[in-house]
Image (spheres, rainbow, N blue to C red):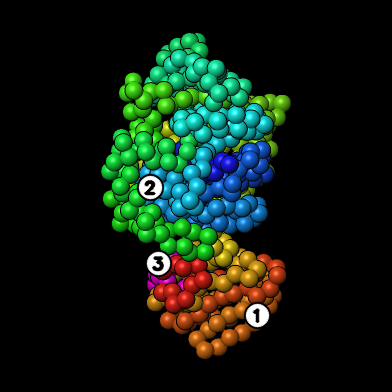
């Protein structure tokens, strides 16, 4: 049975301002009604598979857990990466974790942020390739190109892998050995690739047995293998999370599976037959830019992809996303307009790759708009910064039923809480009280306190902070059900 491994790391900066470092694109609802992570997991229902392993950055752990809970999706664990080290170490950690069960499953490695329109074709192709993986091949899936695309890497196919082989006979498309992986081309080169018919887009989707991948990683990148082996040897379970050894993983150098394993296999004639590419034709996109998102989105008769409260007058072939306000356009063509609570992007579709330059400038200036939205998700719920001044900050806080903020105190700020709806159970020093709608309380500087929702409905309240310093790092936690420091 297949064990999916879903990689939910990455910052998704090319889709700023919707995608932020602390809430990147895999957690956003960009196509359909589910987030990209949820959609990735839901489409696996067409396969015979175990509950998937999820790999994510440690700071995103509660976003992952909440999205799985909200969609009622089962999993085999959420592995936390203390630092990003690219795909080769991440897959190694997953493979080593999978072997702990005493089995040697076929791993299906997927990114959490792809759009796939033809899910039936996707699942059929993956299921039919399982025999290749069970025969100790390392399989990748090359997307059949539909245009000369300069935003993707490519895979050049080699000779046809004989359909007479038992492990290839079940495939609906002929598999091939891999001649080589190539980087993102210029337009003329991409046109040549498309015309030749010998090249596929590199999807980043892989399938192989856990032991087979680890053997090849150990042969070609023994330092990565050793670091990952040390990192997984000392794991700690925390709620749904699997924490690996930070020091060992930080010592691992970063590398992609393409460079670390697949390319060395292809370049060595004695092992080149182990690496196989299977053509995949399923309306796939990695949604790597606003233009690519426009391409895969549903459009109105004028060619506009619209989300949110938008009035588009004499506007054509544009992507318009309104998150918080009414957005109106007049006389636009081939444009991207994205509005959030704290930032607006306006760009020509042809120039959207330059979003990277905006992100770099935000990073240089240490702007908060790079890191997170005004609406911030926490394991207990979320908060939204409504207003701020020199010595005050106003938040709207939503606490999920049965959840509780940490027992904490602040050195520099006092807080005033007003309940808007629901019931709040509040600890203030030695005092405990219940507040309902239109009731309020005051938390002085230095007082130990906590907030809990004991009810079955969401708790909504307004928090007014006042003081000389209002940063999120002015929190001293004494108890926390989510294991935060």
Q: Secondary structure at mark 2?
A: loop
Residue 235 visible somewhere in the drawing = yes
Label 1 neighbour load within 10 Å: few <14, some 14-19, many 20+: some
- Residue 145 has which mark? none
* First reached walking from the N terminus: tag 1 or tag 2: 2
Looking at the image, residue 91 lies above or below residue 465: above
- Tell me the distance, in whole angstroms, between the alpha carbons under discs 1 and 2: 43 Å
Q: Nearer the viewer, residue 55 or 124?
A: 124
> At which x and y percent is residue 463?
56, 70
Give residue 335's quadrant in the image: top right
> At which x and y percent is residue 302?
68, 26
Q: Nearer the viewer, mark 1 or mark 2?
A: 2
Residue occupying the point 46% across, 68% down = 483
- Of the 4 image quadrants, the one containing the N terminus is top right
Query: Which residue in the protein does label 3 denote?
Result: 473
- Residue 435 has which mark? 1
- Horizontally, is 73 left or right of 352 in the view? right
- Horizontally, is 441 left or right of 365 in the view? right
Looking at the image, residue 413 lies above or below residue 4: below
Q: Which residues are magenta?
A: 466-475
Residue 149: say if magenta: no
| Type of secondary structure dominating the magenta stretch | loop
């Amino acid at each position: 049975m297949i064990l999916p491994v879903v990689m939910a790391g990455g910052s998704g900066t090319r889709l700023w301002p919707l995608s932020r470092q602390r809430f990147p694109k895999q957690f956003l609802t960009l196509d359909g009604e589910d987030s990209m992570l949820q959609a990735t997991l839901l489409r696996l229902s067409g396969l015979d598979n175990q509950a998937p392993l999820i790999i994510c950055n440690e700071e995103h752990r509660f976003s992952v857990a909440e999205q799985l809970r909200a969609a009622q999706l089962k999993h085999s664990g959420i592995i936390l990466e203390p630092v990003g080290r690219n795909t080769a170490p991440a897959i190694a950690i997953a493979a080593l974790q999978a072997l702990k069960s005493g089995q040697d499953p076929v791993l299906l490695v997927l990114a959490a942020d792809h759009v796939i329109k033809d899910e039936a074709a996707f699942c059929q192709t993956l299921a039919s390739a399982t025999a290749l993986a069970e025969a100790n091949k390392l399989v990748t899936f090359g997307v059949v190109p539909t245009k000369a695309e300069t935003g993707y890497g490519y895979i050049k196919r080699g000779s046809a892998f004989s359909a007479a082989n038992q492990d290839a006979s079940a495939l609906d498309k002929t598999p091939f050995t891999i001649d080589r992986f190539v980087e993102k081309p210029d337009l003329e080169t991409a046109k040549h690739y498309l015309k030749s018919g010998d090249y596929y887009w590199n999807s980043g989707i892989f399938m192989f047995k856990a032991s087979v991948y680890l053997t090849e990683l150990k042969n070609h990148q023994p330092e990565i293998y050793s670091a990952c082996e040390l990192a997984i040897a000392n794991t700690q379970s925390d709620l749904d999370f699997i924490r690996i050894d930070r020091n060992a993983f930080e010592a691992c150098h970063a590398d992609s599976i393409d460079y670390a394993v697949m390319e060395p296999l292809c370049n060595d004639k004695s092992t080149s037959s182990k690496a196989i590419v299977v053509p995949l034709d399923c309306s796939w996109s990695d949604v790597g830019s606003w233009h690519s998102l426009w391409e895969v989105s549903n459009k109105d008769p004028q060619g506009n992809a619209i989300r949110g409260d938008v009035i588009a007058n004499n506007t054509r072939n544009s992507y318009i996303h309104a998150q918080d306000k009414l957005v109106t356009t007049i006389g636009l063509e081939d444009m991207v307009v994205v509005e959030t609570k704290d930032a607006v992007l306006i760009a020509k579709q042809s120039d959207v790759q330059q979003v990277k330059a905006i992100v770099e400038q935000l990073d240089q200036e240490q702007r908060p708009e790079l890191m997170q939205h005004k609406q911030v998700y926490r394991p207990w719920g979320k908060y939204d910064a409504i207003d701020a001044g020199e010595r005050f900050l106003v938040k709207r806080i939503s606490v999920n039923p049965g959840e509780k903020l940490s027992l904490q105190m602040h050195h520099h700020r006092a807080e005033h809480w007003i309940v808007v709806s629901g019931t709040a159970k509040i600890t203030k020093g030695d005092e405990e009280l219940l507040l309902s709608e239109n009731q309020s309380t005051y938390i002085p500087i230095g007082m130990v306190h906590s907030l809990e929702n004991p009810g079955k409905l969401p708790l909504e309240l307004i928090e007014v902070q006042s003081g000389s310093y209002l940063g999120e790092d002015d929190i001293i936690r004494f108890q926390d059900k989510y294991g935060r420091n």
